[in-house]
Amino acid sequence: MSTPIPAIHAASVSFPVPSQAGIGLRHRHVAEFLTSRPRVAWIEVHSETYLAAGGPRLHALEAIRRDYPLSCHGVGLSLGSAEGVDSEHLGRLATLYDRLEPDLVSDHLAWSVTGGTYLNDLLPLPYTEEALDLVRRNVERTQETLGRRILVENPSRYLDFEQSTIPEWEFLAELAARTGCGLLLDVNNVYVSAGNLGFDAAAYLAHVPAQAVGEIHVAGHAVHETGIGTLLIDDHGDVVADAVWALLASTLERIGPRPVLVEWDTRVPELAVLMAEAARADHLLEMRHAA
């Protein structure tokens, strides 16, 4: 069994990105960031968007990164894959992170690779001791290769496995304790999963270990009425729902301020709309800073 690198013990999490609201940097807004330097505390990008060795997209990000703290959010590590983490993909991420020197790095509690084929989705896994040990190995290898601590994000879920024996929050807490990784707590994902699977979102959030949370996400979601009930889809395509803001407020009250990211990936609006959502998150954070 490999040993986590010493500097990343979950009980001593640091927050290199300020405990303020950030936004996801999307292509539509890059020119505005290059020319007018919007007043936002930090930015997050999807790592896989920038894996090319050079070119205008990466050079633009490097220019923007000089002015903002940066979080790199991966979608392709497949930390839940029984085949292990792909060496080539992990190596390309290591090269990117060495170049950009991001302040936070993260990926998902999910799998997306089988037989060497990448699937365009973040697929669920059963929460069992066997799966926990598998993810532990993948996280440890990732952290050792990158030479840095990663944050692992809770997924949005649409089904449960009969084989699962561990609540998701406990699975993530144990993963952080065993590997020294941190947690990226996606409050919208908890809300979506709770709505689809019928558990209590507030109770889930009350159990997440505060000391392991290094970043929080909020986003919009879609509501679909089906023949058998309501289905919530984590599409990142609208403003954050009031119920999700309420869950964020109660979470910040319990664990204290953290960096909070407003995600928006489909039907991306003008930058002013994202800035307004970030201002709403900042208002909740300012209340906790003042408490």
Image (cartoon, grey):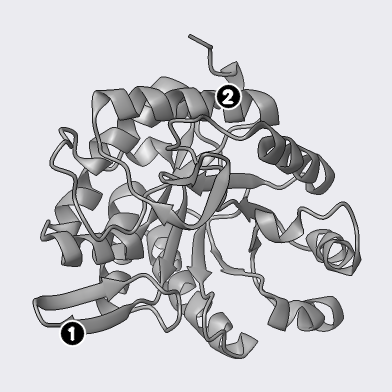
**Residue sitting at the far front:** 115
Which residue has dot 1 on it?
225
Residue drawn at 38 percent across, 78 percent down: 240
Q: Residues within 10 Å of mark 1 (few under 14, many from 20)?
A: few
Q: Give the vertical position of 235 relative to 210 (above or below).
A: below
Is residue 73 visible in the rendered structure shown here?
yes
Q: Earlier in the sequence, mark 1 or mark 2?
A: 2
Seen in the picture, residue 53 relative to 82 is either above or below; the reply is below
Query: Disc number at residue 209?
Result: none
Q: Nearer the viewer, residue 32 or 238?
A: 238
Q: How many residues crowd mark 2 within 10 Å: few (<14), some (14–19), many (20+)?
A: many
Question: In the displayed structure, does residue 157 sit left or right of residue 36?
Answer: left
> Type of residue at label 1?
Glu
Q: Is residue 159 left or right of residue 75?
A: left
> Along the horizontal axis of the image, is 125 left or right of 105?
left
Q: Position of residue 111 (x, y in %)?
A: 44, 44
Instruction: Give how far across and how far down residue 244 sits, in percent.
Output: 29, 71
Give the residue number, with chain letter if any, for mark 2.
Answer: 141
- Point out the image quarter for the C terminus: bottom left
- Residue at the extreme top of the image, as rendered: 1
Image position, residue 39 (x, y; %): 69, 76
Q: Is 7 placed above or below 284 here?
A: above
Q: Is residue 180 visible?
A: no
| Secondary element at image label 1 | strand
User: Of helix, strand and loop, which one carries label 2?
Assistant: helix
* Number of marks present in the image shown: 2
Amino acid residing under circle 2: Arg
Q: CA distance from mark 1 to mark 2?
A: 42 Å
Instruction: Please tell me which residue is depicted at 77% across the width and 44% down the height of the picture.
Output: 101
Q: Is residue 225 above or below residue 89?
A: below
Q: Quadrant of residue 135?
A: top left
x, y (%) of residue 33? Answer: 78, 77
